[in-house]
Amino acid sequence: MSYLTVPLPFREARYMAEHIREVTLRRHQVPPPELLQAHTDLMVRICYLHPDVEDRDVNKLVMMCMIHDLNQSRHPDHTLILLLDQREWEERETIFYIETRLKPSNPALAQALFNLWKEYGANETFLAKLFREIRDLVRFHRAFMHEKRAQRIYSYHYIECLRLCIGSEWLQVIADSILDSWIVVKEIQNAGPIYFVFGGPGSGKTFVCERLSATHGLEHISLAALIEEEANDPSSARGITINTNRSRGRPIPMDLSISLLKERLRQADGSGILIDGFPASMDELREFEKEV
């Protein structure tokens, strides 16, 4: 068996690697970083969906996902990292994992992974080069999600450099869609602080917002006004949805409300925003935080 014929052993081995890493991190009392599983699973999905990969090469490409993170399967020795360069350290950790953790229980898988690891490192074959682009696309997406959740702010130069690493036409389409979303996030971040104004019907929210706008220069956005404007646009598909829900006595979908707010926030001048009529629940607030 030179390579796996089904993905199940890959998943079992991958989960074992993550379990070993998690246990080691707990033993060293180190807060675990962002889980690798979500990123690895995303790489696996892209490998299976890529139109330029033949069926006989899919499993080989999928196994490279495992190779990519093998050197992170145990807690790093920072003394060794200082003594060795990054490539030497990754090579040492990968060989250690294959020889001590995988080979005793599954020598065929260990040998297959070792062969693929050498192919991946040489970066000469079509699959090795394609996988590096898939890896870069996942890094690009991860950086976008970090900035979207305000965990880190990246310069536009850094964003462009990540994008230029992706050369495959199919992957470029995905990367460009991420870049478009990234631009939206950047524009919303420049809208300034956002304040929610709460109160029941007739409580004077509009009056309060107008006073605050006049005295502090904040921009007032009313969700009800945005919905009404959209409903009165005969060419708007969202307007049709709004009117249909109203006629049937249904609430306006949460994702539609958030979409209207996002578009309006992109036009803000950066002085700060007052939003009234939203959120109606904690679920809406949590979803808004994820999106905006």
Image: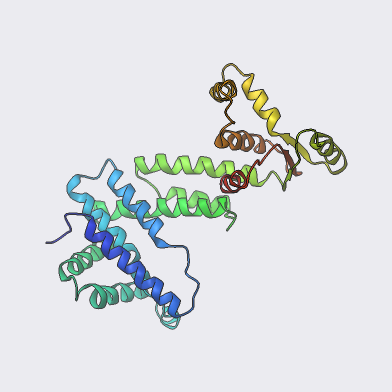
Q: Residue furthest left?
A: 1
Please say if 98 is above or below 280: below
Left/right placement of residue 234 relative to residue 92 reads right
Please say if 117 is above or below 136: below
Q: Picture quarter containing residue 198?
A: top right
Q: Residue at x 59, y 25 (%)?
A: 249
Q: Picture quarter containing residue 262?
A: top right
Please say if 96 is above or below 191: below
Q: Residue at x 56, y 22 (%)?
A: 248
Q: Where is residue 95? Give x, y as percent.
A: 27, 74
Q: Residue at x 48, y 67 (%)?
A: 33
Q: Residue at x 58, y 46 (%)?
A: 283
Quadrant that contains the N terminus: bottom left
Q: Where is residue 20? Give x, y as percent.
A: 35, 73
Colour scheme employed for the rendering of this structure: rainbow
Q: Where is residue 125? Give x, y as percent.
A: 24, 55
Whether residue 123 can be seen here: no
Q: Where is residue 207? Give x, y as percent.
A: 84, 35
Q: Residue furthest top?
A: 234
Left/right placement of residue 139 relative to residue 190 reads left
